[in-house]
Image: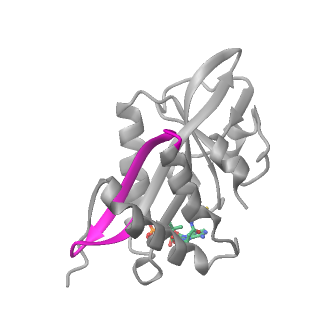
Amino acid sequence: MSDAFGIRAATAADADAVDAIVRTAFAGTDFGYQGEAGLVRMIEAEGDTLVSLVAERDRAIVGHVLFSRMDVEADGAALSGAGLAPVSVIPERQGRGIGDALIRAGLDALREQRVTISFVLGHQSYYPRFGYSADLAARFASPFAGPHFMAMMLDSDAAWPLGGRADYAPAFGRMG
Ligand SMILES: CC(C)(COP(=O)(O)OP(=O)(O)OC[C@H]1O[C@@H](n2cnc3c(N)ncnc32)[C@H](O)[C@@H]1OP(=O)(O)O)[C@@H](O)C(=O)NCCC(=O)NCCS
């Protein structure tokens, strides 16, 4: 078995494996809930998936990332937005760059789809390396506002909006 892994788009046939990855990744976290796995299915069923990628090692899925459609308004205009959540790597393979590669590939896929802005709710020591900023997210009204709420313009040269509102896909509102 090698350490090498590949990244590809998730398909419907991956749904059970993705559930399992999300459950095992989140089982060991402070979040303490298992709602994230159901979330992936709800977002997919409601057509709100923008990018869903899996990481594979020796033909086994070892990681997954989802970016879902957001309802974003900035400076009075609608903006195409994507929320990063959840991102999961099986505990035995964490800390080897799989999460990093999944997130970077996802951000590239969003750029190809001409998505303008991405948001994430997560750890302040992890997401800034990809370009996410709490200062940018602070310009947007959101139920998730706070130091863990971060945003990035997918075109890093784009000017930051002065202010607006950012809402995750409806499935997030039903998470237990
Ligand atoms: C978060 C996660 C997806 C990162 O994937 P990964 O493949 O382990 O990460 P990478 O190897 O790309 O990056 C490792 C870095 O992430 C950091 N990291 C991992 N999990 C972290 C966490 N929960 N909070 C903060 N930093 C974290 C490591 O400390 C390491 O930092 P360093 O590069 O400064 O040493 C993975 O650890 C995971 O599935 N965690 C459980 C689920 C989870 O918490 N998801 C995110 C919810 S916000």
Count of numbered labels shown in the rendering: 0
Kindly indicate the quadrant of the structure image that contains residue 13: bottom left
Q: Main secondary structure of the magenta part?
A: strand
Q: Is residue 52 magenta?
A: yes
Colouring used for the render: one colour
**Closer-to-camera residue (142/49):** 49
Horizontal and vertical percent position of residue 115: 47, 30
Magenta segment range?
Answer: 46-63
- Indicate left or right for 51 with 11 as reference: right
Q: Tell me where residue 7 sits by quadrant.
A: bottom left
Q: Residue at x 63, y 71 (%)?
A: 34
Front one among 34 and 158: 34
Q: Look at 63% across and 30% down and name the residue there.
A: 71
Q: Position of residue 76 (x, y in %)?
A: 71, 14
In the displayed structure image, the side of residue 135 where residue 55 appears, left or right: left
The image quadrant where one finds the C terminus is: bottom right
- Using the image, determine if residue 113 lies above or below residue 15: above
Figure check: 159 above or below 134 = above
The outermost residue toward the top is 76
* Quarter placement of the N terminus: bottom left
For image coordinates 69% across by 46% down, the residue present is 134
Confirm whether residue 10 shows in the render: no
Residue 147 position within the rendered picture, expressed as x and y whole percent measured from the top left = 76, 52
x%, y% of residue 80? 54, 27
The answer to whether 13 is drawn above or below residue 1 in the figure is above
**Per the image, is 88 magenta?**
no
Please indicate whether residue 175 sits to the left or right of residue 108 in the image.
Answer: right
Image vertical order of residue 60 relative to residue 116, above or below:
below
Q: Residue at x 44, y 64 (%)?
A: 99
Evaluate whether residue 91 shows in this view.
yes
